[in-house]
Amino acid sequence: FAFNDKNGLVSRTGLQFSYAYHIFLFRSQISFGLAAQAFQYRIDAEKLNFANENDPIKNNGLNLVAFIPDANFGFYWSSEKHYLGFSANQLFQSKIKLGSSDLPHFKLYRHYYFMGGYKFELYDGFAIEPSTLIKTTEQFLPQADIGMKLYYKTDYWTGLSYRTSGSLAAMFGVRINQFYFGYAYDYALSS
């Protein structure tokens, strides 16, 4: 698939090719995924403001575009009541060089994600599902999302999640045939 991601002055535009392999074992499924991608990393030069017109970065041949190859990997084990997964992004930890050789480069650090959840059946079609998502980087900056969803007949759900960096998320959703529609809203607990 093609993607275009823009965050402030920085944009990433590229292509990603993914492959997944599934193994069905008893009443569970084990899945492996691998993705290869290539993207263009760009900084919008028109929006750059330098406090000092003689800034060495500005005057040393700032190249605002870089081409980056990368790869991602994932593993997922699931059944009717539980799931467990692991993934790693930015496996190549590419370096982005913007400018001449004496300027610093930027490194895309590897990101790791661990997740799991278990669905407890209650009564009359209701179930609750506690879940956890733990994220970290090569620099070991961990963050966790701890959540709880309430299901009704697997077709409707609502839930809350707390992120250790200081935010809450409320969510709800519905399943119509094989399609899932959901909405989540994050609220930061600090400025």
Image (cartoon, helix red, strand yellow):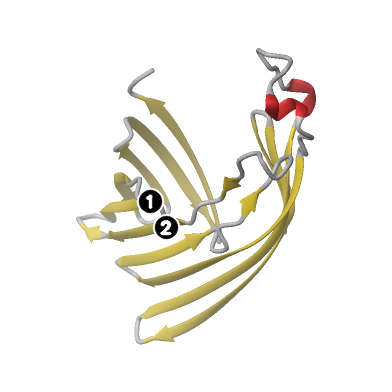
The residue lying toward the viewer, choosing from 130 and 71, is 71
Residue beneath disc 1: 136
Residue beneath disc 2: 112
Mark 2–mark 1 distance (CA, rounded to whole Å): 5 Å
Crowd rating for badge 2 (residues with CA inside 10 Å; few <14, some 14–19, many 20+): many
Q: Amino acid at mark 2?
A: Tyr
Task: Give SS at disc 2.
Answer: strand
Closer to the chain start, of discs 2 and 1, is 2
Is residue 2 something one can see in this rendering?
no
Give the label on residue 114, or none. none
**Residue 9 position within the rendered picture, expressed as x and y whole percent measured from the top left:** 68, 29
Residue projecting furthest to the bottom: 26
The residue located at (68%, 13%) in the rendering is: 52
**Residue 113 position within the rendered picture, expressed as x and y whole percent measured from the top left:** 40, 57
Residue 10 versus residue 135 in the image, above or below: above
* Image marks 2 and 1: residues in contact by CB distance under 8 Å: yes
The residue located at (76%, 34%) in the rendering is: 62
Q: Amino acid at mark 1?
A: Thr
Residue 188 position by quadrant = top left
Task: Give SS at disc 1.
Answer: strand
Q: Is residue 106 left or right of residue 10?
A: left
Residue 49 versus residue 187 in the image, above or below: above
Crowd rating for badge 1 (residues with CA inside 10 Å; few <14, some 14–19, many 20+): some
**Residue 99 position within the rendered picture, expressed as x and y whole percent measured from the top left:** 73, 39
Residue 178 position by quadrant = bottom right
Question: Quadrant of the image for the C terminus?
Answer: top left
